[in-house]
Image (tube, grey):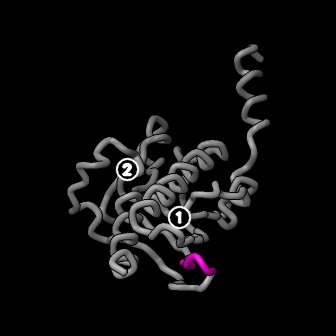
Protein backbone atom coordinates (compact mmCIF):
# COMPACT_ATOMS: atom_id res chain seq x y z
CA UNK A 1 0.00 0.00 0.00
CA UNK A 2 1.33 3.46 -0.88
CA UNK A 3 2.31 5.78 1.99
CA UNK A 4 -0.34 8.34 0.97
CA UNK A 5 -3.02 5.66 1.01
CA UNK A 6 -1.89 4.65 4.51
CA UNK A 7 -2.18 8.26 5.67
CA UNK A 8 -5.66 8.60 4.20
CA UNK A 9 -6.76 5.29 5.76
CA UNK A 10 -5.36 6.33 9.14
CA UNK A 11 -7.08 9.71 8.97
CA UNK A 12 -10.42 8.12 8.08
CA UNK A 13 -10.09 5.59 10.89
CA UNK A 14 -9.38 8.37 13.38
CA UNK A 15 -12.48 10.36 12.46
CA UNK A 16 -15.37 10.01 14.90
CA UNK A 17 -18.47 8.40 13.49
CA UNK A 18 -21.53 10.56 12.78
CA UNK A 19 -23.38 8.68 15.50
CA UNK A 20 -20.91 9.95 18.08
CA UNK A 21 -20.96 13.43 16.55
CA UNK A 22 -24.74 13.55 16.78
CA UNK A 23 -24.38 13.30 20.56
CA UNK A 24 -21.96 16.26 20.67
CA UNK A 25 -22.80 19.23 22.85
CA UNK A 26 -23.80 22.25 20.76
CA UNK A 27 -22.04 25.59 21.12
CA UNK A 28 -23.54 27.71 23.93
CA UNK A 29 -24.91 30.30 21.48
CA UNK A 30 -26.32 27.73 19.04
CA UNK A 31 -30.06 27.98 18.53
CA UNK A 32 -30.33 24.47 17.11
CA UNK A 33 -29.03 21.00 17.77
CA UNK A 34 -29.45 18.29 15.19
CA UNK A 35 -29.19 14.55 15.82
CA UNK A 36 -29.22 11.87 13.14
CA UNK A 37 -30.90 8.74 14.47
CA UNK A 38 -29.33 5.58 13.00
CA UNK A 39 -27.86 7.29 9.91
CA UNK A 40 -26.58 3.93 8.65
CA UNK A 41 -30.23 2.98 8.02
CA UNK A 42 -31.17 6.14 6.09
CA UNK A 43 -32.75 5.48 2.70
CA UNK A 44 -30.18 7.33 0.60
CA UNK A 45 -27.31 9.53 1.73
CA UNK A 46 -24.72 8.15 -0.67
CA UNK A 47 -22.21 9.77 -3.02
CA UNK A 48 -22.10 6.76 -5.34
CA UNK A 49 -24.05 3.57 -5.96
CA UNK A 50 -22.08 1.70 -3.29
CA UNK A 51 -21.43 4.75 -1.10
CA UNK A 52 -19.02 5.10 1.80
CA UNK A 53 -19.43 5.86 5.47
CA UNK A 54 -17.10 8.88 5.32
CA UNK A 55 -19.02 10.40 2.39
CA UNK A 56 -22.31 9.82 4.22
CA UNK A 57 -20.93 11.54 7.32
CA UNK A 58 -19.72 14.50 5.25
CA UNK A 59 -23.14 14.87 3.63
CA UNK A 60 -24.90 14.68 6.99
CA UNK A 61 -22.54 17.29 8.43
CA UNK A 62 -23.45 19.68 5.60
CA UNK A 63 -27.14 19.10 6.32
CA UNK A 64 -26.56 19.65 10.06
CA UNK A 65 -24.72 22.91 9.37
CA UNK A 66 -27.55 24.10 7.16
CA UNK A 67 -30.16 23.41 9.86
CA UNK A 68 -28.06 25.40 12.35
CA UNK A 69 -27.59 28.24 9.85
CA UNK A 70 -31.33 28.45 9.16
CA UNK A 71 -32.12 28.38 12.88
CA UNK A 72 -30.08 31.58 13.26
CA UNK A 73 -32.47 33.24 10.81
CA UNK A 74 -35.80 31.83 11.96
CA UNK A 75 -35.53 30.87 15.64
CA UNK A 76 -35.68 33.83 18.05
CA UNK A 77 -32.70 34.49 20.30
CA UNK A 78 -33.01 32.58 23.58
CA UNK A 79 -35.07 29.80 22.00
CA UNK A 80 -33.70 26.33 21.35
CA UNK A 81 -34.62 24.03 18.46
CA UNK A 82 -33.90 20.30 18.79
CA UNK A 83 -34.21 18.28 15.60
CA UNK A 84 -34.00 14.48 15.33
CA UNK A 85 -33.65 13.32 11.73
CA UNK A 86 -34.81 9.73 11.33
CA UNK A 87 -34.48 9.32 7.55
CA UNK A 88 -33.13 11.11 4.49
CA UNK A 89 -33.61 10.29 0.83
CA UNK A 90 -31.57 12.65 -1.33
CA UNK A 91 -33.03 13.95 -4.58
CA UNK A 92 -32.16 11.73 -7.50
CA UNK A 93 -30.81 8.21 -7.49
CA UNK A 94 -28.06 6.09 -8.98
CA UNK A 95 -28.89 4.07 -12.07
CA UNK A 96 -26.15 1.42 -12.33
CA UNK A 97 -27.87 -0.31 -15.23
CA UNK A 98 -26.60 2.56 -17.41
CA UNK A 99 -23.13 1.02 -17.22
CA UNK A 100 -20.03 0.86 -15.02
CA UNK A 101 -19.10 4.51 -15.61
CA UNK A 102 -22.40 5.63 -14.06
CA UNK A 103 -21.85 4.26 -10.53
CA UNK A 104 -21.01 7.70 -9.13
CA UNK A 105 -23.51 9.76 -11.18
CA UNK A 106 -26.65 10.79 -9.32
CA UNK A 107 -29.46 11.11 -11.86
CA UNK A 108 -31.97 13.72 -10.73
CA UNK A 109 -35.49 13.23 -12.09
CA UNK A 110 -38.87 14.22 -10.74
CA UNK A 111 -39.54 10.57 -9.85
CA UNK A 112 -36.77 10.81 -7.21
CA UNK A 113 -37.88 13.71 -4.93
CA UNK A 114 -35.91 14.71 -1.83
CA UNK A 115 -37.34 13.59 1.51
CA UNK A 116 -36.41 14.23 5.13
CA UNK A 117 -38.27 12.57 8.00
CA UNK A 118 -37.78 14.22 11.37
CA UNK A 119 -39.21 15.33 14.67
CA UNK A 120 -38.54 18.64 16.36
CA UNK A 121 -39.07 20.56 19.57
CA UNK A 122 -38.80 24.31 20.03
CA UNK A 123 -38.41 25.62 23.58
CA UNK A 124 -38.25 29.17 24.86
CA UNK A 125 -35.65 30.59 27.24
CA UNK A 126 -37.46 29.10 30.27
CA UNK A 127 -37.52 25.62 28.73
CA UNK A 128 -41.25 25.72 27.97
CA UNK A 129 -42.17 23.83 24.80
CA UNK A 130 -43.44 26.36 22.26
CA UNK A 131 -43.89 24.00 19.32
CA UNK A 132 -43.15 20.37 18.54
CA UNK A 133 -44.07 17.71 16.06
CA UNK A 134 -43.06 15.17 13.46
CA UNK A 135 -42.65 16.11 9.83
CA UNK A 136 -42.14 14.23 6.61
CA UNK A 137 -40.64 16.89 4.36
CA UNK A 138 -41.07 16.13 0.68
CA UNK A 139 -41.35 18.28 -2.40
CA UNK A 140 -42.81 16.48 -5.39
CA UNK A 141 -42.43 19.64 -7.52
CA UNK A 142 -38.76 20.17 -6.63
CA UNK A 143 -37.70 20.14 -10.28
CA UNK A 144 -39.97 23.08 -11.05
CA UNK A 145 -38.33 25.42 -8.53
CA UNK A 146 -35.70 27.88 -9.55
CA UNK A 147 -32.84 27.42 -7.11
CA UNK A 148 -30.43 30.21 -8.03
CA UNK A 149 -29.01 30.45 -4.52
CA UNK A 150 -27.73 26.87 -4.47
CA UNK A 151 -27.34 26.32 -8.23
CA UNK A 152 -24.00 24.51 -7.98
CA UNK A 153 -24.62 22.82 -4.62
CA UNK A 154 -25.18 19.04 -4.84
CA UNK A 155 -27.54 19.34 -1.83
CA UNK A 156 -29.53 22.26 -3.29
CA UNK A 157 -32.83 20.35 -3.33
CA UNK A 158 -32.48 19.24 0.29
CA UNK A 159 -31.44 22.73 1.41
CA UNK A 160 -34.43 24.24 -0.37
CA UNK A 161 -36.64 21.69 1.41
CA UNK A 162 -35.16 22.71 4.78
CA UNK A 163 -35.45 26.44 4.00
CA UNK A 164 -39.09 26.03 3.01
CA UNK A 165 -39.81 24.13 6.24
CA UNK A 166 -38.19 26.79 8.42
CA UNK A 167 -40.07 29.57 6.64
CA UNK A 168 -43.43 27.80 6.90
CA UNK A 169 -43.01 26.28 10.38
CA UNK A 170 -41.63 29.30 12.20
CA UNK A 171 -43.34 32.17 10.38
CA UNK A 172 -45.58 33.00 13.37
CA UNK A 173 -42.84 32.57 15.96
CA UNK A 174 -40.54 35.05 14.24
CA UNK A 175 -43.25 37.72 14.41
CA UNK A 176 -43.91 37.32 18.14
20 relative to 85, above or below: above
The residue closer to the viewer here, 158 or 31, is 31
Q: Quadrant of residue 8?
A: top right
Residue 146 — which label?
none
Name the residue beneath numbered marker 1.
88
**Residue 69 vs residue 135, the one in the foreground:** 69
Classify residue 128 as left or right of residue 107: right
- Element under label 2? strand
Q: Residues within 10 Å of mark 2 (few under 14, many from 20)?
A: few
Residue 139: percent from left, percent from top: 34, 70
Question: Quadrant where the N terminus lies?
Answer: top right
Residue 86 shows in this picture? no
Instruction: Give the quadrant of the C terminus.
Output: bottom left
- Density class for disc 1 (Cα within 10 Å; few <14, some 14-19, many ≥20) is many
Query: Would you name the residue on which mark 2 appears?
Result: 107
The residues colored magenta run 120-126
Q: Is there a contact, CB below 8 Å, between mark 1 and mark 2? A: no
Q: In the visual, does 139 lie left or right of 118? A: left
Picture mark count: 2
Nearer the observer, 112 or 84: 84
Magenta stretch containing residue 121, yes or no? yes
Q: Quadrant of residue 114?
A: bottom left
- Tell me the distance, in whole angstroms, between the alpha carbons under discs 1 and 2: 17 Å
Amino acid sequence: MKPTMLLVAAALAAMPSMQAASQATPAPDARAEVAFVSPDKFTDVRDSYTGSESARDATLEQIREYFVEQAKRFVPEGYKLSVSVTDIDLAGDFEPWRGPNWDDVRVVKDIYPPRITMSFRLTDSTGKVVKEGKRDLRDLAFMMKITTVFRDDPLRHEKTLISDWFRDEFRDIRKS
